[in-house]
Amino acid sequence: MPPELPAGTDPAALEAVACTVARAAGRLVRDERPDDLGVTAKSTRTDVVTEMDQRSQELLLDRLAALRPDDAVLGEEEGGREGTSGVTWVVDPIDGTTNYLYGVPAYAVSVAAVVGDPTVPGHWSPVAGAVLDPERGELYHAHLGGGASLTTAAGTRALRPRPTTDLALALVGTGFGYAADVRRRQARLLVDLLPRVRDIRRHGSAALDLCAVASGRLDGYYETGLNPWDRAAGELVATEAGAVVGGPADEVPTRDLTWAAAPGLAVELSALVRELAARHVGSVGEPR
Ligand code: LIP
C-alpha cells in the first residue's frame, strides 16, 4: 500500500531537491577534506564522526531549510530539526565514514524525503531520495512510482537489478556494526551464509550497497543494525529499480534486519537471511 502523502506533496520535486543537496554536500566532502581530518569516537572507539560528517550535515540542513523550510530533518549527527509539513528529510552526511577516514573511495551522501515518523520503526516510508558517490561521480535517485536512475557525466540511465535466480551464484553485500558483541554474532551469521552464495562483498556503505543491488553490481544485500539514515534513500532506489527490499518478517526493513535482492532471488535469499539473523544475531538494540 503506497503511503499517504501530505497535500501538495510532489515526489518528483522532492527527488530533485534530494539530488541538488546531495550534490552540494558531495562536492564539500570530496573537495574540502583536510589532510589533518578531525575525528571523534561515538558509541565505540571504532564508531567515529569526522569534522566533514558534521560540515556535510550542516550544509544539508542549511540547503534544506532554504528549499523546504517547513520540513523536518533527521540526520545521523546531532542537530536535526522539527517540521510542520509532514515530510522529514532523513540524511546521512557521509555514509561509509570509516572508508572516508582511511581514504578508501567508497562512501556516499544519502538524502531521503520520508513521510511518517522515521524514529518509529515501521511507521515511515521514503517517497524520494538520492545517493551520491562523490568519488565515482555517480548519483542514484528515485521517487515513489517514478523508477530509479543513475546519473553520471555521461547522462542518465534507468536502473535494473540482475536477472540472477540461483542463490549459489549470487554476489551478496553486507556490513557489520561497531560493538564487539554484535560483530561476533554477525560473524556467526556470515559463517553459515558464505558457503551458500557465490561470494560476499563488504563495501562499507549501506547506501551504496543498496544502490548496487539496484544497478546489478550486487545480486543481494543484507545487514543487521542499520539506522534509518543508512538505508532510507538506498532502499527506495532499490525498490524503484525493481529489486525487493524487506526485513525480519515482511517487506518492511528494520534495524534488526534489512535485506535487498534481485527479484529472482528474493524468496530464497530473504528466507535464508531471516533464519540466520534470528538464529545468530537477534535484536541489535536501539540506534546509537
Ligand atoms: C555505515 C553503514 C555500513 C555499516 C557500517 C556503518 P556510517 O554507516 O553504511 O553499511 O556496515 O558499520 O554503519 O556509520 O559510515 O554512516
Image (tube, grey):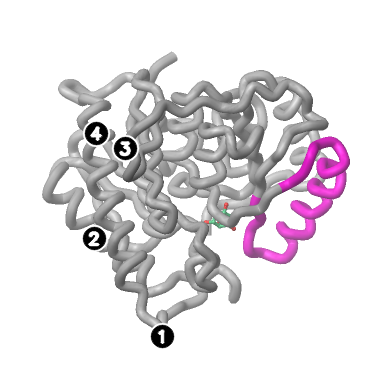
Provide the residue span drawn in magenta. Answer: 175-200
Query: Can you identify the residue that label 1 sits on?
Result: 36
Q: CA distance from mark 4 to mark 3?
A: 7 Å
For disc 2, the neighbor class at 10 Å (few under 14, some 14 to 19, many from 20) is some
Query: Residue 203 is drawn in which quadrant?
Result: bottom right
- State the residue position of label 4: 14
Amino acid type, label 3:
Ala
The reply to whether callout 4 and callout 3 are in contact (CB within 8 Å) is yes
Q: Report, in whole angstroms, how far the alpha carbon at label 2 lies from the one at label 4.
A: 17 Å
Residue located at (72% from left, 66% from top): 180
Say if the magenta span includes residue 190.
yes
Give the amino acid type for the residue marked by disc 4 in the picture: Leu
Residues packed near mark 4 inside 10 Å, few (<14), some (14 to 19) or many (20 plus) = many
**Residue 247 placement, left or right of 106:** right
User: What percent of the width, then of the height, locates residue 272?
Assistant: 78, 31
Image position, residue 11 (x, y; %):
26, 26
Give the answer, above or below, for where 249 lies relative to 202: above
Q: Nearer the viewer, residue 39 or 152?
A: 152
Question: Magenta stretch containing residue 75, yes or no?
Answer: no
Instruction: Please state if 30 lies on the left or on the right of 241 as rendered.
Output: left
Q: Can see residue 286?
A: yes
Disc 3, SS: strand
- x 54%, y 66%: residue: 104
State the residue position of label 2: 59
Q: Is residue 114 in view from this perspective? A: no
Image quadrant holding the N terminus, namely top left
Q: CA distance from mark 2 to mark 1?
A: 21 Å
CA separation in Å, label 3 and label 2: 16 Å
Position of residue 109 relative to residue 255, above or below, is below
